[in-house]
Image (cartoon, rainbow, N blue to C red):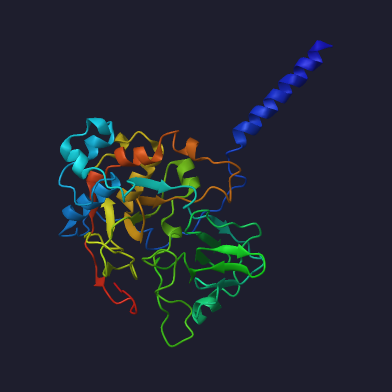
């Protein structure tokens, strides 16, 4: 009599273990996202470097460590020490309360990406002002007249309220900034952008030739540089595999005011930093990424070395963008994918910020009313 009970108990325990083991696995296999021509091009080792590259990399590294952007000392030794043991110089230069250091947006500021089927029912998204009245943006509003937002879609919970929809059957992407769903009015947003033919084009917004109505305009898009997040997003499936096959977008706390460089189409920069939105960096070819212990950081470093990084937004921290886990996972996989490490700490101390190189800027622009062409 006891044997069947023991077998039943063992089967029950095995079932529970399998459930716990699979809870953080994706609910379904996600199709690969598009690989745009801009982010998919390998950085040639002979590419021209910026003449002020040392200053640019120095500023970026300091901000990544949470130090003052113009710190004259190396603040890396201070990162791993108790603040009580900091030297006077470290206390003066290695703590900037306006900068959180380096990190990866993985939760409330990570854009959720929803993959729309060919037959997904479309909805209108209304762009509204601060007072709730409709914005006077006829071309943008026309582009969001029919958006295939899947049922149950939710924007990111952070203040940016980002939401991305990609439909492979039409090769079209829609991205929203400060998106929310009103019970009476439906989907609302402060701003956004639609991009057609995303798998075969350069990944920045461009004003279509001719006269209005325009199918696309260069000042559309969620990020302030008008370079969308999706092509430079760290995909969870890539962290599962340990390989990222494209370039990455990068948000930086302090970017130069009033000027940007192609492929950026604008900026929200408000400081004296030399780093412009649209600035591209790469990890130096001589750096051995095999030295990096954390698997996720190593994959990011290898992508930076092969394809590069591009500054596409302002932020309170030096931030890479990772896909939000909620659309495809039943529980948060980040502790497993990041090997249980503190992500901010390993990005500060394990990512080789000192070995970055700044690429030469193809063109700088100042007039937001005009496209910033190569």
Q: Residue at x 32, y 46 (%)?
A: 101
Q: Is residue 149 above or below residue 253?
A: below
Quadrant location of the N terminus in the rendered image: top right
Q: Nearer the viewer, residue 159 or 162?
A: 159
Outermost residue toward the right in this view: 1
Q: Residue at x 55, y 57 (%)?
A: 155
Q: Tell me residue 271's x, y (percent).
A: 25, 62
Q: Nearer the viewer, residue 239 or 62?
A: 62
Q: Residue at x 64, y 27 (%)?
A: 17
Outermost residue toward the top in this view: 2
Instruction: Tell me how many marks there are.
Output: 0
**Residue 225 occupies quadrant:** bottom left
Q: Tell me residue 114's x, y (percent).
A: 57, 57
**Residue 13 occupies quadrant:** top right
Q: Nearer the viewer, residue 65 or 49?
A: 65
The answer to whether residue 168 is seen in the rendering is no
Quadrant location of the C terminus in the rendered image: bottom left
Q: Tell me residue 277's x, y (percent).
A: 30, 63
Q: Is residue 193 above or below residue 1?
A: below
Left or right: 140, with 40 as reference point: right
Q: Tell me residue 152's x, y (percent).
A: 65, 57
The answer to whether residue 29 is seen in the rendering is yes
Left or right: 321, with 21 as reference point: left
């Amino acid at each position: 009599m006891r044997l069947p009970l023991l077998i039943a108990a063992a089967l029950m325990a095995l079932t529970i273990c399998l459930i716990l083991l699979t809870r953080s696995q994706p609910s379904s296999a996600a199709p690969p996202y598009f690989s745009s021509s801009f982010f998919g091009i390998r950085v040639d080792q002979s590419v021209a470097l910026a003449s002020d590259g040392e200053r640019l990399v120095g500023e970026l590294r300091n901000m990544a460590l949470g130090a003052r952007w113009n710190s004259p000392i190396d603040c890396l030794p201070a990162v791993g020490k108790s603040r009580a043991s900091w030297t006077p110089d470290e206390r003066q230069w290695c703590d900037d309360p306006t900068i959180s250091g380096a990190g990866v947006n993985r939760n409330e500021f990570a854009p959720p990406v929803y993959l729309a089927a060919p037959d997904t029912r479309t909805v209108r998204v209304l762009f509204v002002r601060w007072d709730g009245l409709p914005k006077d943006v006829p071309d943008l509003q026309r582009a969001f007249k029919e958006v295939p937002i899947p049922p149950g879609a939710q924007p990111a919970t952070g203040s940016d309220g980002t939401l991305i929809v990609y439909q492979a059957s039409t090769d079209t992407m829609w991205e929203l900034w400060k998106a929310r769903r009103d019970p009476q009015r439906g989907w609302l947003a402060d701003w956004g952008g639609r991009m057609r033919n995303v798998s075969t084009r350069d990944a920045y917004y461009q004003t279509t030739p001719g006269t209005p109505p325009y199918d696309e305009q260069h000042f559309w898009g969620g990020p302030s540089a008008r370079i969308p997040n999706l092509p430079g997003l760290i995909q969870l499936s890539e962290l599962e595999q340990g390989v990222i096959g494209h370039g990455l977008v990068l948000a930086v706390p302090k970017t130069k005011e009033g000027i940007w460089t192609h492929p950026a189409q604008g900026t929200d920069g408000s400081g004296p930093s030399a780093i412009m939105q649209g600035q591209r960096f790469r990890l130096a070819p001589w750096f051995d990424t095999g030295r990096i212990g954390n698997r996720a950081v190593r994959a990011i470093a290898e992508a930076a070395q092969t394809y590069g990084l591009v500054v596409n937004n302002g932020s309170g921290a030096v931030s890479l963008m990772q896909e939000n886990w909620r659309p495809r996972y039943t529980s948060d996989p980040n502790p497993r994918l990041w090997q249980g490490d503190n992500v901010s700490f390993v990005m500060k101390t394990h990512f080789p910020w000192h070995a970055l190189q700044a690429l030469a800027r193809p063109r700088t622009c100042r007039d937001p009313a005009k496209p910033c062409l190569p």
